Amino acid sequence: LEPPPLVRDDPTEPGDLVAQFEAVLDPVGDRGDLVGSAGSTGLDVTLTVDGQPGAVPVAVGRTAYRIVQEALTNVTRHAAATTASVHIDHRPDSLGIRVEDNGTGAPATTVPGIGLLGMRERVSALGGQLRAQPREEGGFMVEARLPVERTS
């Protein structure tokens, strides 16, 4: 028997996720970015970016994209939220991602899926950290810190 893969393969995963992650940083662009797409569902989504954006390794860009994608998907499908925020924090040695909402504060248990588990696997494979939990003030929060060695 072959051991299971460390990170699940997703046959529906887009080919150029690094470029798509960069599109996250362009919420008014016409590239079908994640923030704009979530906003088109009626969710009021804000984006903040701290630090100096720079190139990141492909695996980090892919993981960051999937975290934002899955977190916003969970918000629109399960949280009964009206607002969400995406915060990207560029540091010289890491990339931070935080997605928060004002919804019900607990992940859905009625719809099967591997969203949070997949996030944990991807972040762990890169040596990063992930927190996903209800917020004290209501809503839910997903926060990741990914180590990076900047490529430029």
Image: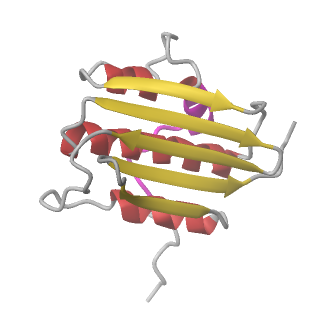
Image quadrant of residue 13?
Answer: top left
* In the foreground, 10 or 83: 83
Residue 38 position, x and y percent, is 34, 27
Check the image and report above or below for 83 versus 75.
above
Check the image and report above or below for 146 versus 16.
below
Residue 18 within the magenta-colored segment of the rendering: yes
Quadrant, the N terminus: bottom left
Residue 77 position, x and y percent, is 21, 41
Tell me which residue sits at (72%, 39%) in the image: 90
Tell me which residue sits at (25%, 29%) in the image: 82
Magenta part of the protein: which range? Answer: 9-22
Residue 22 position, x and y percent, is 62, 28
Image side of residue 61 versus residue 45, left or right: right
Check the image and report above or below for 117 versus 87.
below
The colour scheme is: secondary structure
Q: Residue furthest left?
A: 110
* In the foreground, 143 or 151: 143
Residue 150 position, x and y percent, is 83, 44
Image quadrant of residue 45?
Answer: top left
Residue 49 within the magenta-colored segment of the rendering: no
Tell me which residue sits at (59%, 24%) in the image: 25
Check the image and report above or below for 8 versus 69.
below
Image side of residue 80 versus residue 56, left or right: left
Q: Residue furthest front?
A: 137
Quadrant, the C terminus: top right
* In the foreground, 6 or 21: 21
